[in-house]
Image (spheres, rainbow, N blue to C red):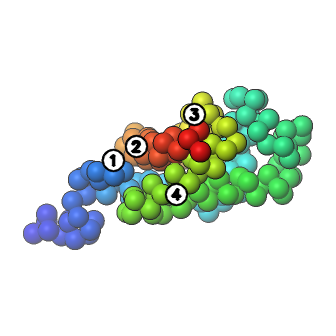
């Protein structure tokens, strides 16, 4: 009975791996649950993520015409850049929200890859962004090892489909 109740609760086997995303239902839940506090204040977290990225690799700041010559205080007060940060966070939120429909996430990430391909953004900068995001999740939100493993799998999933379209258009 417990096994049937568990399958009903999860909507399937919670430990079966999706052939599309590589995530289990349990990992989908962990990613979605741990993203909620970040999503609740997407503007703040988005700006902070980019500021940390700019500190880690100042070259990344040059991709943003509106803020490339601004100091951190002026970046924080730039509505145009805050809009970009919120768009970035929204893309992650949409992917997180739709993880039970991984084919939809694939289509979204391919579109994201195509748009960044036009700007000649290399995988190097995506990896640096991942390092900053993972650091924020681990250190600021104090995620567990299991939660971090779920995030690593999620990021690998979305990056595979972004990278499929990078520099191909």
- Under tag 1, what secondary structure? loop
Q: Earlier in the sequence, mark 2 or mark 4?
A: 4
Circle 3/circle 2 CB separation < 8 Å: no
Provide the residue designation for mark 2: 153
Circle 2/circle 1 CB separation < 8 Å: yes
Query: In the displayed structure, does residue 82 sit left or right of residue 86?
Result: right
Kindly tell me whether residue 32 is visible in this rendering: no
- Residue 75 in the image: x percent, y percent? 84, 46
Alpha carbon separation for disc pair 4 and 1: 17 Å
Circle 4/circle 3 CB separation < 8 Å: no
Choose mark 4 or mark 1, whichever is in front: 4
Provide the residue designation for mark 4: 108
Query: In the displayed structure, does residue 164 sit left or right of residue 18?
Result: right
72 or 153: nearer the viewer: 153
Q: Residues within 10 Å of mark 2 (few under 14, many from 20)?
A: some
Q: Residue 22 carries which label?
A: 1
Residue at 57% across, 34% down? 123
- Under tag 3, what secondary structure? helix
Q: Which mark is residue 123?
A: 3
- Under tag 4, what secondary structure? helix
Residue at 69% across, 29% down? 56
Q: Earlier in the sequence, mark 4 or mark 1?
A: 1
């Amino acid at each position: 009975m417990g096994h049937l109740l568990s399958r009903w609760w999860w909507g399937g086997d919670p430990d079966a791996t999706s052939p599309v995303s590589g995530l289990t239902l349990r990992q989908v839940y962990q990613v979605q649950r741990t993203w909620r506090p970040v999503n609740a204040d997407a503007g703040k977290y988005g700006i902070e993520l980019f500021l940390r990225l700019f500190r880690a690799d100042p070259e990344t700041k040059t991709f943003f015409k509106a803020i490339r010559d601004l100091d951190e205080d002026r970046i924080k007060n730039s509505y145009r850049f805050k809009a970009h940060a919120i768009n970035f966070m929204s893309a992650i939120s949409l992917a997180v929200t739709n993880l039970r429909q991984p084919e939809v996430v694939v289509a979204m990430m391919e579109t994201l890859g195509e748009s960044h391909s036009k700007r000649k953004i290399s995988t190097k900068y995506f990896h640096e962004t991942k390092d900053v995001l993972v650091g924020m999740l681990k250190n600021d939100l104090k995620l567990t090892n299991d939660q971090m493993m779920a995030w690593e799998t999620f990021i690998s999933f979305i990056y595979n489909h972004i990278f499929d379209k990078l520099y191909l258009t």
